[in-house]
Structures are given as structure tokens and as C-alpha cells.
Amino acid sequence: MRAATNNTALTLSLLLAVFLWGGSNAGTKFMVARWPPIWTGSSRFLCAGLLLLAILRFTNWFGAAHPLTAATRRRLWLRGGSSLAAYIVAFNWALRHTSVSHVALYLGAAPVWALLWERPPARSWHTIQRYSAAALALAGVFVLNQPALKLGGGSWLGEALGLAASVLWTHYSRQCRALSAELSGSEISAHTMWRAGLWLLPLAAVEVCQKGLLWRADLAWVQSYCIVVGGVVTFALWNRALRFWPASQVLLFNNLIPLSTMSWAYVWLGEPITPTFWVAMLLVLAGVLLGQMVICQRPLVTEDQ
């Protein structure tokens, strides 16, 4: 009973994160069209990480904070922070060159990359399932890329960066999963975000010096939403789930982010839905669901354990 309740709570929290993340993705698309992409990500993660650290320090909203060992600090810098920094660079630059719905769809394929990452190939039915799932997801990626392949030009760069962001997000989620043995989800979010912001700060300063920085009230409001909601709330929900479920199971919810993002982008940005989007999404979703059949046979971790 306790385990079922915990799993239901985790599911609802991840659905909320998916909905809020869609708004944050659309907001980021709005921002990178007007602000330098690396500066947008660096400033957001610095502010969100420091805000979350302050909440952990002065309140008990997210539970008690744990002391950091030297080894944990090193892992936070070299694994968590660096992988998150690489992800946000690929993600923000992808938004510069293609639609936010496309980039979100690439992220929806992340569960398949996680499945392939978690176990080496073996002569078994599970291996056939995993690689069949990967083939379906890659077919979806290929369908989504067809317009770019035919037309060439800058849009192909956006699609390639979107795919890279998907792989880097999977890598970051795996690092968070490893860190969850010592830290809570909120702590992982806080420590990796401000470190990612610092990793990127020199490049962000170069961008601002070269391109300048536009200040407007609407930009400040959107960036604030992305910091508080997209940077604090959603990451805390996401990393908490990674404490109890395998990365590939949490990443299953990624396949809902394209729908959430597309809806936000269509309503607030007027972004059209490309003809290949729905076919590609069906293929990616089929790959994800096939891959999850392997996970469903594994026992889940509960708070009692």
C-alpha cells in the first residue's frame, strides 16, 4: 500500500513537472531569440541554483540538507555540473535553429538512450526489445529530420543540436541518479545548477560583450518564470523521482514533454506544427513504450527500502 501511494505521488509530481516544463521550454525559445543562448542558460542556472540553496539553508520545505564530502563536491563539479552545462548549451542553441516542439521531441527519445546505456548487449529477448525500441525512436528522429535533410541549411544544425541535447540530458539524469545515494533531489538540483552556471559564465560574458544584452520587462518576467518554475520547481520534482526510480523509468515522462511544449508554443508563440511532427512522435512514443516493457519487470524502490 505504501509503495503504491509513493508511486502514485511520484507519477503526479512528474506530470506536473512535464506541464510546467513545457511553459519553460516555450519561454526559453522566446528568450534565446533575444538574448545570447549561453548567457540565458548560465544566468538562469546561477539564479535558480542559488535560490534553491537559500531555500534549503533557511527552510525545511525540501527536507534537511546534507554535508558535502570532498568526493561529492568533485563529482558535482566534474559530472553533475559539467553535464548540465553541456546540455543547456546544446538545448539553447538548438532552439535558435529549429522549433521548440522539435527539440522537445528529441528529448522525448531520452528513455531509449537510457535503456541502451544501462545494460550492455546480451543474447536475450530483453536485448532485442531494447534495440528494437532504439530503432523505432531513431526512425522517429529520421522522419522529423526529413525536411531539414531535403532543404539543407541552418535548420539541420538545430535538429542535430536537439538530438545532442537529448543524449546529454540522459547523461545528466544518470549522474543525478548516482548522486542521489548521498543527496536529495533538491540538493542535486541546487548544486548542479549553480555549478553549471559558473562553468558557462566565461562563455556567457564573451557572448554579452560581442552581442550586447537587451533589457525589457517581458524578458525579465519570462526569465523569472524559467528560473523559479523551470529551474527550481521542475528540477526538484524530477530529481526527487530519480531517487526512487531508474533513470530510464523517470525519462519515460519525457515523451509527454513534446505535447506540453507544443501546446505552450502554439498558444503563446504562434509556432506552427510541422507535418512530420505527429508521425515522428508516434514512432518515438512506440519506441519508448516498447523499451519500458523491460523496466516493468523490475522491482521499484520505495521509501521503506
Image (cartoon, rainbow, N blue to C red):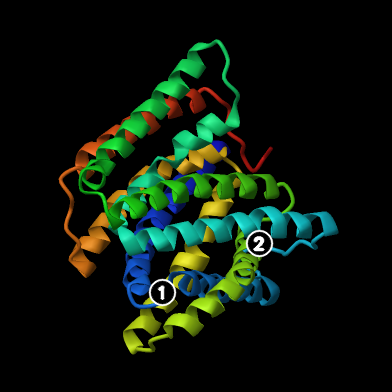
Q: Amino acid at mark 2?
A: Glu
Residue 252 makes an appearance in the image:
yes
Q: Is residue 43 rendered to the left or right of residue 147?
A: right
| Residue under numbered circle 2 | 187
Quadrant in the picture for residue 190: bottom right
Q: Position of residue 268 (x, y in %)?
A: 22, 69
Residue at the disc numbered 1:
225
Query: Which mark sits nearer the N-terminus, 1 or 2?
Result: 2
Tell me the element at label 2.
helix
- Front residue of 184 and 48: 48
Q: CA distance from mark 1 to mark 2?
A: 20 Å
| Three-letter amino acid code of the residue under disc 1 | Tyr
Residue extending farthest to the right is 70
Horizontal and vertical percent position of residue 47: 56, 76
Whether 68 is drawn above or below 10: the answer is below
Residue at (43% x, 78% y) in the render: 224
Locate residue 62 relative to residue 253 in the image: left or right.
Answer: right
Front position in the image: 204 or 24: 204
Residue 291 % position (x, y): 43, 27
The N terminus, quarter of image: top right
Please state, as top left, top right, bottom left or bottom right, where the C terminus lies in the image. Answer: top right
